[in-house]
């Protein structure tokens, strides 16, 4: 069962867990977040694992200050203005990623954009001490509503995580507002803790609405990284014009002659496989192979999310179904 520590006594313990690639539930001004080091693939994989029946939706990366934000993403003038007006606070900005920012691709589900937010209070202190951004979705198991008290987090996720930091009831009580600068305007991707009108007042124009990147349907295939190559799942054989994405000790027939070969986890560890998934798909795609053949991935634990992501990548794009 998770330990519950008050914010005043939790900093060192939280740091130790995060530095070891583990996850910690933390209070933010919006809702509780399930945080992991955004540069550590195993830490990020553990977030999805702890949420149960996970999907690899892109996560928000939380930063301590503007300098950290600018090492991660490229700010256009409008986004910068919004950051200055509302950070720290319940506003999330979707921005293009900067090169070599160290963010693990599982955080962004392989996208070339990233959602950034600077939280108030304990979260900000923790990130500053850690010196690295924290990836954190709301601290609830998949399909449940976001937790706004430490007790609600403990009841829901307590058996799966080691520490809940108790900061009392979260003041805002609903998730951050998510926006993205688009051309000369700013699109509202998810309404949340800052009213649209406040944002409109800050930028002096109306927000664009609807038809955006589909944050309310975050699993939408078209908004995710989809490889140029076709994907062939549960492959027991591989052709020499195909790349092979392996798992464990299977070695699909013909693997030695495959155009390229990467193994998600030689030891069959699903957490390791999850942390390698997006980077390896991208690398095999760059090999120029027509098809990426993928060995069978078991469905237990994170295997469900891995299979979910693979079948979305394999599906024809015009069949994309929004999911939540
Ligand atoms: O208040 C909040 O935002 C809380 C606290 C913990 O910070 N976090 C939160 O995270 O609500 P989560 O994972 O439950 O929701 C994040 C949303 C998802 O709808 C996701 O699809 C979207 O952000 N998102 C993340 N990265 C994105 C990107 N690059 N482009 C578009 N949407 C993105
Ligand atoms: Mg959520």
Image (cartoon, grey):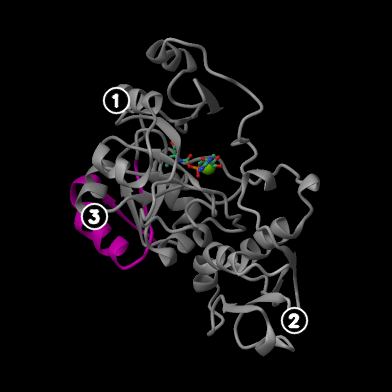
**Front residue (pair 191, 235):** 235
Write the residue at 73% across / 67% down.
290
Q: In this view, does 137 lie to the left or right of 296?
A: left
Q: Is residue 165 left or right of residue 294?
A: left
**Front residue (pair 131, 303):** 131
Above or below, comparing residue 306 to residue 239 in the picture: above
Q: Calculate the distance from the C-alpha at mark 2 to the C-alpha at mark 3.
A: 44 Å
Residue numbers of the magenta segment: 1-27
Disc 3 marks which residue? Answer: 130
Q: Calculate the distance from the C-alpha at mark 1 to the C-alpha at mark 3.
A: 23 Å
Q: In this view, does 194 lie to the left or right of 266?
A: left
Identify the mark nearer the N-term, 1 or 2: 1
Residue 245 percent coordinates (x, y): 64, 75
| Disc 1 CB within 8 Å of nearest ligand 1 atom | no
Disc 2 marks which residue? Answer: 238
* Disc 2 secondary structure class: loop
In front: label 1 or label 3: 1
Residue 136 percent coordinates (x, y): 42, 48
Write the residue at 37% across / 59% down.
39
């Amino acid at each position: 069962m998770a330990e519950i520590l008050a914010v005043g006594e939790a900093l060192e313990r939280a740091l130790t867990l995060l530095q070891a690639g583990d996850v910690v539930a933390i209070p933010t001004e919006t809702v509780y977040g399930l945080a992991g080091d955004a540069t550590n693939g195993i830490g990020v994989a553990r977030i999805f694992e702890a949420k149960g029946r996970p999907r690899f939706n892109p996560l928000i990366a939380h930063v301590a200050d503007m300098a950290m934000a600018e090492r991660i993403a490229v700010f256009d003038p409008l986004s910068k203005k919004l950051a200055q007006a509302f950070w720290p606070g319940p506003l999330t900005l979707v921005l293009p990623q900067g090169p070599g920012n160290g963010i693990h691709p599982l955080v962004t589900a392989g996208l070339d954009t990233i959602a950034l937010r600077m939280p108030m209070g304990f979260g900000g202190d923790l990130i500053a001490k850690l010196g690295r951004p924290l990836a954190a979705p709301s601290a609830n198991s998949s399909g449940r509503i976001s937790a706004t008290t430490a007790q609600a987090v403990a009841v829901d996720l307590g058996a799966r995580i080691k520490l809940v930091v108790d900061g009392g009831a979260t003041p805002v009580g609903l998730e951050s507002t998510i926006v993205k600068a688009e051309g000369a305007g700013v699109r509202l991707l998810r309404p949340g803790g800052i009213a649209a009108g406040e944002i409109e007042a800050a930028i002096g124009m109306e927000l664009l609405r609807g038809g955006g990147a589909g944050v309310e349907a975050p699993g939408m295939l078209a908004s995710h990284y989809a490889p140029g190559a076709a994907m062939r799942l549960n492959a027991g054989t591989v052709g020499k014009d195909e790349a092979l994405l392996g798992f464990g000790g299977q070695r699909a027939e013909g693997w030695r002659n495959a155009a390229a070969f990467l193994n998600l986890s030689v030891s069959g560890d699903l957490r390791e496989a999850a942390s390698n998934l997006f980077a390896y798909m991208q690398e095999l795609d760059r090999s120029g192979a027509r098809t990426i053949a993928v060995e069978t991935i078991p469905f237990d634990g994170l295997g469900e999310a891995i299979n979910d992501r693979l079948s979305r990548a394999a599906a024809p794009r015009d069949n994309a179904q929004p999911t939540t």
